[in-house]
Amino acid sequence: MDLGSGPAEAGKVKKDALDGVTLTFASYGGIFQDGQEAAAVKPFAAESGAKVLSDGPTDYTKIKTQVDAKNVTWDVVDTDTLWAKRECGKLLMPLDTTIVDTSKLPKGMGGKCSVPAMSYGVVLMYDKKKFGGNPPKNWADFFNTAKYPGKRAIPGIPSDASPGALEAALLSDGVAPDRLYPLNVDRALKKLTSVRSSLVFWDTGARSQQLLESGEVSMAMVWSGRAYAAVKNGAHFAPQWNQFLPVSDSLAVPVGAINPKASMALINYYLGAAQQTKLTELTSYSPINSDAEPKIDKLAAQYLTTAPGRQAQALKVDNVWWAKNQEQIIQKWSDWLAR
Amino acid sequence: MTALMDITSPATGGRPRKGVGGRWGWLLLPAVALLAVLFLVPLGLMAWRSITEPTPGAGNYSWFFTSDVALATLIRTLAVGAVVTLVTLVFSYPYAYLMTVVGARARIWLTLLVLLPFWTSLMVRTFAWVVLLQDNGVVNQLLGTVGLGPLQLIRTTTGVVIGMSQVLMPFMVLPLYAVMSGIDRRLLDAAQGMGARPATAFLRVFVPLSLPGVGAGALTVFITSLGFYITPALLGSPDQALISQQIFTQVNGLLAWGRGGAMGVVLLAVTLVLLGLVGIVLRFTRTRGGAR
């Protein structure tokens, strides 16, 4: 296999370099994986000569089983970014930067074993009919049930805890945004306990979207992609981007992948500006190549984390701290949820 | 276990059973082989993991029995299973009885009504319940127009019990019907001929004869309910999580397969102990209730 000479360039692969190679790309299915395939995976197969199969949805137990059994059938996996950081060197292998060009990634994104697959945000959505005249300005308002009556939807996935509810709870409890980390998890849970009767938990993206569309809640902490889909379907909600938490999926290669260089060549191709432009146009997730210029409708553009001025509104999330502490937090979080 | 086999067989009791040994025993081979490979081996592996991962010893079990959340979830799972069993029985008994007394055409329709949801995906049925039970859903709108609502139905144990009962009802109706249709109705006539009132004849002749069906249905519903995942996840709230959801958290969220395995083993052991107790109680009532 010859991937060519010279430094790698995101979005490029040497013509027919991977003739005869077969790869399997695993992601989360749905419109997202369809977009990934149309924007990057299929064109990569056509140019490189590799045969690329699709599988999914991503399942961490399956990755562990494959790696433990030394029978890895997923060559490139789309996973949660914190999980990728946590499993770096364990279930996931370091990426070779002579094959993967990371120079066009947004600042601070990507790690030793993974690159972002797209980006989105955890954003505050509020009922326009109820609070349109005096919209909530931040997460402190989100938990202010006296000023903004009604139920609040927050993520409540027992098997997963990620940046969002805990940060928001601490902010509303008076912690300054730049002094959040290390998170005082017990204090955050205590704050959440005090408003628990007003909380509704969603455990899948579809469920969060359904809560917005049915109008069961007056505010919600949701993924921006789902927020956009709900509003597009007629939910009378509007976003408050102040203090939104940036999130991304990641692409990585499991330890023991049969042809890691070919896997990384696919990842490198995926990161190209043209591929990222198309991915955003197809999925409404934000691109992770700073040269990407997607043409999308006005509503969708409002929900991009790359919209002008948006990054300045973002809360600074310490993903390194999260990756290090996530397992303990998941245990605490799932115990708190089950109480 | 023979007591259990008795109540799960649709025979109405008293009929001598032939052992499965002898010349036809080999017919069981494919089933036994399938169970061994697809069920016993993985089960053994999970049990092995529970005492070897992440370190050898009983660490996973001591974690389980010192975690108030894990224990509360186990008890909740058993309690929800018991309530669901009771609810399905209350709804299924008259239904199955009706199936035995109506004409052939009506019986086909009644059977179809039971089987139709059986053939529908569990996901679809559960989402239908989400639409019905949510705060501004169909049920609450109806309750609202008659001045009774809104009630908190979704994200409560009530919602979970409603959904699970509907999903599991066929498992109660079918064994009940199988047993009831085999009951000789002339026994009821005989009882009335000897002076019993219809209600007495029903309670003292029909109900005892139908008990094997009740036992089979209740066992199937109860055991199946212990492993329910999707319905409680969608209709319940995380603070009413059942043990399958907690196992998912350990296995999938934390990749702590040792703990997940330990939870599975505990659930299995508790189930077997409960079944043993039921078997003993049934045997006791059977020897006492010699009138049958």
Image (cartoon, grey):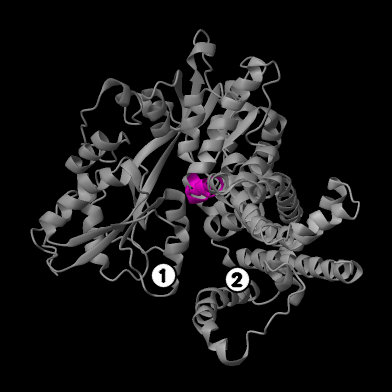
Q: Which residue position is annotated with label 1?
A: A67
Q: Nearer the viewer, residue B101 or A90?
A: B101
Residue at the image point whose x is 39% and y is 75% from the top: A70
Vertical placement of residue A235 versus B229, above or below:
above
Residue on which the image places disc 2: B54
Residue A225 in sight in this render: yes
Q: Please, which residue is most extreme toward the left here? A: A15
Q: Secondary structure at mark 2?
A: loop
SS majority, magenta = helix
Asked whether, in this view, residue B244 is left or right of residue A260, the answer is right
**Which chain is disc 1 placed on?**
A
- Residue A168 visible? The answer is no
Q: Image quadrant of residue B251?
A: bottom right
Position of residue A175 measured from the top left corner of the image (x, y, whole percent): 62, 30
Q: Residues within 10 Å of mark 1 (few under 14, many from 20)?
A: many
Q: Could you tell me the amino acid type at mark 1?
A: Val
Q: Residue furthest front?
A: B193
Q: Residue at x 52, y 22 (%)?
A: A215
- Across and down, in percent, residue B191 comes to 85, 56
**Membership of B115 in magenta stretch:** yes
Q: Quadrant of residue A309 in the image?
A: top left
Are callouts 1 and 2 both on one chain?
Answer: no
- Amino acid type of the residue that numbered disc 2 sits on in the rendered structure: Pro
Say which quadrant the C terminus of chain A sits in.
Answer: top right
Q: Marks 1 and 2: CB-CB under 8 Å?
A: no
Near mark 2 (Cα within 10 A), the count class, few <14, some 14-19 or many ≥20, is some
Q: Which residues are magenta?
A: B112-123
